[in-house]
Image: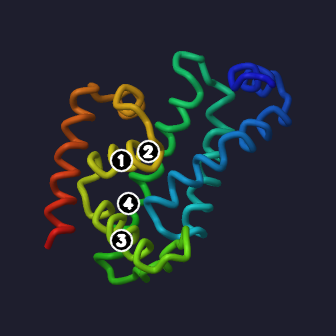
Amino acid sequence: MKTDEELIKQFQSGNDDSFNELVKRHLPGTYGFFIKFTSDPIEAEDLAQDVFIKMYKALKKFRFQSKFKTYLYRANINMSNTYLKRSKWRNLLHLDQAPEPVHFDNTNEDQWRRDELWDAVSKLPSRQRIVVTMRIAEEKPYKEIAEVMGISENSAKVNYHHAVKTLKDQLEN
C-alpha cells in the first residue's frame, strides 16, 4: 500500500486516482471528527466533503513540511471553527433547528448519557472543545493534539484539564 506522501506526489503529477485513494483512506476519520461536533450525519457529511474539496485544491501546492494527517486535522479544525461561527450566527438569528441525535447503540440510558456529555462538550470554549474531541473521540495523544492545533503540549493538557473540570461541574448539576 502506498503512503499518503506517495499518493500526494502522484496527485501533484496529475493522477486524480491517487487523490481518490486519499479520500477513501481518510474520509471515515474526517466524518467521525465532524459527527462529534454536529450530532447531525448530514451536516457532518457536508463538512467532510468541504474539507476534501479544499484538500483537492491545496494539495497541488503541498510542500511536505508536515505529515498529511496533521495537515488534514488542521483542515478539520479550521472547518469546525467555520461551522461553529456559522452556527453561532444561526442561533443568534433563531434559524437553528436542533439536529436529531446520532444513535450509536440501543441502550437508552447509555445514549442519554452520551448525548448529555456531547451536548456539554459542544458548549465548551472552542479550544477546549477541540482538545476534548481529539482526546476522547479521536484518542489522540497530547503531543499530536498540540502539533495539530499549533499550541504547546502543556497548553493542550491544561485545556483538557479545564474542559474536564467544567464538564464534571455541568454534569453533576
Q: Earlier in the sequence, mark 3 or mark 1?
A: 3
Circle nearer the viewer, 3 or 1: 3
At horizontal 52% and vertical 72% (from top left) the residue drawn is 102
In depth, the one of 64 and 32 nearer the eye is 32
The residue at which mark 3 appears reads as 113
What residue sits right under mark 4 in the picture?
84
Mark 3 or mark 2, which has the lower sequence index? 2
Mark 3 and 2 residues: CB-CB less than 8 Å, in contact? Answer: no
* Label 2 or label 4, whichever comes before in sequence order: 2
- The three-letter code of the residue at mark 2 reads Ile
Residue holding disc 1: 130
Of callouts 4 and 1, the N-terminal one:
4
Identify the residue at image location x=56%, y=57%: 47
Q: Are marks 2 and 1 in contact (CB under 8 Å)?
A: yes
Q: Residues within 10 Å of mark 4 (few under 14, many from 20)?
A: some
Q: Report, in whole angstroms, how far the alpha carbon at label 3 lies from the one at label 1.
A: 20 Å
Between circles 3 and 4, the one closer to the viewer is 3
Q: Quadrant of the C terminus?
A: bottom left
Q: Which mark is residue 77?
A: 2
Residue 147 falls in image quadrant: top left
Residue at coordinates 55% horizontally, 76% vertically from top-left? 106
Vertically, is 3 above or below 88? above
Q: CA distance from mark 3 to mark 4?
A: 23 Å
Q: Nearer the viewer, residue 3 or 173?
A: 173
Q: How many neighbours does mark 2 have within 10 angstroms: few (below 14), some (14-19), or many (20 or more)?
A: many
- Residue at 42% x, 72% y: name it: 110
In-image side of 143 versus 157 (left or right): right
Q: Amino acid at mark 3?
A: Arg
